[in-house]
Image: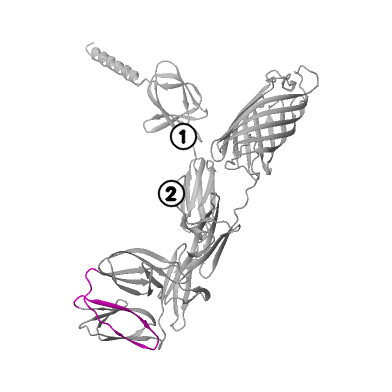
Amino acid sequence: MRHLVPSLGVLVFLCVSMSHAAHAATVYTTRTNIDTTPSGAEVYLVDGGSEKLLGISPLAKYKLPRGIVQLLFKKEGYDDLKETVEIGRTTQSYVFKLTKSIVPATLDFTGGNEVMGATVTVDGKVIGTVPTKTQVMPGRHQCVVQKEGYERWERWVDAVEKQTVTFDVVLVKLAATPGEALVTSNPSGGEVRVNGAPKGKTPMVVEGLTPGQYLVEVSLAGYVGFSQNVVVESGKRTVIDAQLVAQKGDLGEVKVITTTPGLMVYLDGESLGAAPVTKSDVKPGVHILEGKSADGGSTSQNVEVKAGETVVVRLDTNAPAADKARVRVISSVPGAQVDIDGVKKGPSPFVADGLDPGTHFVTVTANGFSTWTQTVTLKAGDNEVIAELGQSGRVDIRVKSGQEADIFVNGKAIGRTPYTGELPVGTHNVLLQRGDGKTEEFRIAVGPDRIVKISAAFGQADPNAVPDNTRPMSWSARAMPAGTGAVDVWAGWPYLLNFSAGGGVGSNIDLGVSARFAFNVINELSATLQWTFVHTRTVAASVEGGIGAGLGTEERNSFFFHAMAKGSVMIADKAAITARVGLLAYTDRVGPEATVPDRDGGARMTLGFSVEAKLTDDLNGFLYFDGDPFNDNRHLYDVSYLSDPKMYGGIGVAWIF
């Protein structure tokens, strides 16, 4: 017995331990309903790193372990979904919504050699250069390809899932803007050739040159020919200044002598040294010879040099008056006439001594060039004025009737007709204004060696034209000008939707067509003609006639003729207020709900008005109202939900074109 007691103790201990172990290993579950929207998804139980497939949704009363569990749902075409739920003791139902997977579309941009390297932008974002591909979400996208020197390429695409859209981009070269060349020479008057083609004499502008390389040549008798290869760029001016060199044996010589010790000599501003001095190889023409002494004295002369000759000049100077001014006038056109304060002085270059300091008027003129005038302020001592003369052409401006008119060129008054004078080479706006305020404007191009003639007609005004305010008002009594028109859209009653289109076809005549829809009751088409017999700036009066027909359900139809008289008050180009008196004659086949048998006919008179006003440059807004106070109902409209209201109206917009 003493051996049996320990054995029983061990046995009890083992039984209790096994019971506890069995209890610890027990997993409690709860029946759970699981479904997805849409159904048919694979349902997995996630445990740590493993996934156990439970089945395909919907799962009914599936035993899930109690506590916190994680479920994974997979379905082709939908994003994977992980959800964490707590499983309790009681049966629960879960429905999980799956999100449809969106597969991007692919845009593929390719093209020829001229497209390679072009920048590609999708929806305003640069995505690379051709060739390139990019993925976008389904929907509408803007695609732009740009490259310098080519027109912008743009397409809109409606992309679909999984779709690959390939663009074979073709770029169109931009049309090159012509350039021009300004050709000058010293001396001027040289013959200009561009790529061998004669163009005229210097100074001149050669216009309309396609961008590229050109050979420009300038030749003048007695001078070595000049040639230069130049590149003309798009929209730019290239300047060629040909400094012509006299041919050998055609140069002159200047010899300067003096009694003034240490006199420094200058020829056209170039120092020759102390006198006596000789300068050979001097180009024929007029030059300025100046002398300056050490005590501040100065003198100058205009010297004419001739080819093959030597001119001897004596220069002597005294100290200058401290309160006098000296001015040297240089012109871009050698030999141009110089006037100072209205007094002719001589050909340029020219030096004038002994002038009072202060304001003086210098004018330089040369044949074929615009007159150069400038107010200059001279200080005591030496001054210099440079006159840049531009080429000019002649104009002859007159009025056919012989009347006088003020002339304005580019907004500046230049005189009265008849007028003959010069204008700078180029384009100008010329405005002629009579004493009564009437004007006539011209756009002219002035060139050298030719005369532009202007003959203003100031033609008689069209007696039928409406002065000042000519904006089309399609509902007014004034006919629209020939060539203009309007499309009207409005809502009203009993015709719920209405359209019309028309325009001016001649003096004071409008033609138009219209469509009116009362849906299943009656829908009508008609044509109208309006004649305006009175129109001024503020009032207009017209008569209008039209004919039309309509069809509806239940064998309804109608035929009608209408006439109308209209009178309008016009408020500048802003609005029109119109009174309307109309007569309508009709014959209708009425519907089965009408209170009269089969066909109904008659006539009615309407009174009304319309108001139309400008909204934008292209749109008018309008409303109208017509009433019939004298007649019975028109039975065409007798249906369960509609009857003749005897008052008609609408509101809408008119597009003017």
Horizontally, is 514 left or right of 159 in the view? right
The residue beneath circle 2 is: 126
The reply to whether dot 2 and dot 1 touch (C-beta < 8 Å) is no
Three-letter residue code for mark 2: Val
Q: Which residues are magenta?
A: 294-323
For residue 495, say whether it is visible: yes
Is residue 320 located in the magenta-colored stretch of the structure?
yes
Q: Which tag is nearer the camera, tag 2 or tag 1?
A: 2
Q: Position of residue 190 (x, y in %)?
A: 46, 77
State whether residue 31 is above or below residue 272: above
Three-letter residue code for mark 1: Asp
Residue neighbourhood size for the residue with mark 2, other residues' Cα within 10 Å, grouped as few (<14), some (14–19), many (≥20): few
Q: Position of residue 473 (x, y in %)?
A: 61, 37
SS of the residue at dot 2? strand
Residue neighbourhood size for the residue with mark 1, other residues' Cα within 10 Å, grouped as few (<14), some (14–19), many (≥20): some
Q: Residue at x 78, y 18 (%)?
A: 596
For residue 347, say whether it is visible: no
Q: Quadrant of the N terminus?
A: top left
SS of the residue at dot 1? loop
Q: Position of residue 598 (x, y in %)?
A: 81, 21
The residue beneath circle 1 is: 79
Report the front residue among 143 and 57.
143
Which corner quadrant of the image does residue 323 belong to?
bottom left
Report the front residue among 529 and 12.
529
